[in-house]
Image: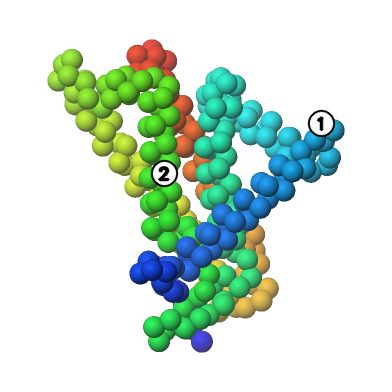
Amino acid sequence: MSPHISIHAENIFQIGGFPVTNAILLSALVFIFLIVITIILRRKLSLIPNTLQNIAEVILDGTLGVMDSVTLDRRKSEEYLPLTMTIFLFVLFSNWFGLLPGVGSIIVSHGGESVPFFRSPASDLNFTIALALISVTFVNVLGVAAVGIRSRLSVFFNFENPIKFFVGILELISEFAKIISFSFRLFGNVFAGEVLLTIIAFLVPYAAPLPFMFLEIFVGFIQAFVFGMLTLVFVSMASTKHEELAENHI
C-alpha cells in the first residue's frame, strides 16, 4: 500500500453541517490532554511542594528568566506568561502528538476513500493560520491595554508628515505579514517532517525512521519555542509606547 500524503486535512465526519477533519480531532485531544493535566496539577498544589510541583516550579522560573531577556521587566514577563506559555505548550504537544503511533496509520473510510483518522494539527494550514490570527490579535489587544488605543493606532496611522505616514502603512502591512510568516513557517516545517517520516517508513520500515523521529521531536520543540518567543517579542513591542520604542532603537 502506497503512502498517503495530502496537503489538506481530510474530513472524517460532520456535526450539524460542520466538517470535522482528522487534524481537528487530534487538536481536540491535545486540548483535552492539556486541560486534564492542568486540573491535576492545580489540585496537587501545596505549600510543601512534591516532586512534580518542584519540577513545574523550576520550569516556570526558567521560563520567566528567558522571558525577562526579552521584556527586561519581570512584571511584564509574569503578565504575558499565560499567553506565551499557552501557545508554546499547545503547539509543542500538537507537534508531539502528531508523532505518536497510530497517527497517520489508523485508516478509516470516508466518502469511499481511505483516510487517516488522526493527523498532526500543524500539518493543516487552517490550524496554523487560526493560531497565527489568535496570536496577532492578542498581541494588539494587549498592546492597546498597555499603551491605550490612541497610542497603538498611531503606530499604523500617523499623519504628522509623509514619511511617518508611509512608515505607518508599512507597519500595518507587517501585521498581516506576521500572520503569513507565523502560519507558513509552522505549517512548512511540520508538514515536511510528516512527509519525510511517511516516505522513510514506507521505503525502509521499522528501525530506519527512528533517527528521523528523534529529529522531528526536536524540530517540534524548536517550532513551538519560536512561535511562543515571537509572540512574546511582538507583544513586548506592542506594549511599549511608540516614542519609547524609538528611543530604545536610538
Report whether residue 226 is seen. no
In-image side of 196 versus 51 (left or right) = left
- Find the residue positioned furthest to the front: 16
In-image side of 200 versus 41 (left or right) = left
- Would you place residue 81 above or below residue 189 in this image? above
At label 2, which amino acid type do we have?
Ile
Residue at image location 66% in from the left, 76% down from the top: 206
How far apart are labels 2 and 1 at the CA level? Answer: 35 Å
Crowdedness of circle 2 by 10 Å Cα count: few (<14), some, many (20+)? few
Q: Disc 1 designates what residue?
A: 47
| Image mark for residue 134 | 2
Nearer-N-terminus badge (2/1)? 1
Name the residue nearer the viewer: 117 or 32. Answer: 32
Per the image, label 1 sits on a secondary structure element best described as loop
Residue at image location 52% in from the left, 44% down from the top: 87
Q: From the top left corner, tell me how far across and down residue 126 is, in percent.
A: 38, 58
Q: From the top left corner, tell me how far across and down residue 155 is, in percent.
A: 29, 24
Per the image, label 2 sits on a secondary structure element best described as helix
Q: State if disc 1 and disc 2 touch (CB < 8 Å).
A: no
- Would you place residue 207 above or below residue 167 in this image? below
In-image side of 85 versus 111 (left or right) = right
- Would you place residue 50 above or below residue 8 in this image? above
Residue at image location 17% in from the left, 19% down from the top: 159
Residue at image location 56% in from the left, 54% down from the top: 31
Q: From the top left corner, tell me how far across and down residue 70 is, in percent.
A: 53, 26
Q: How many numbered marks, from 0 up?
A: 2
Please name which of the two marks, 2 or 1, marks the residue nearer to the observer. Answer: 1
Name the residue nearer the viewer: 45 or 125. Answer: 45
Crowdedness of circle 1 by 10 Å Cα count: few (<14), some, many (20+)? few
At label 1, which amino acid type do we have?
Leu
In-image side of 84 versus 237 (left or right) = right
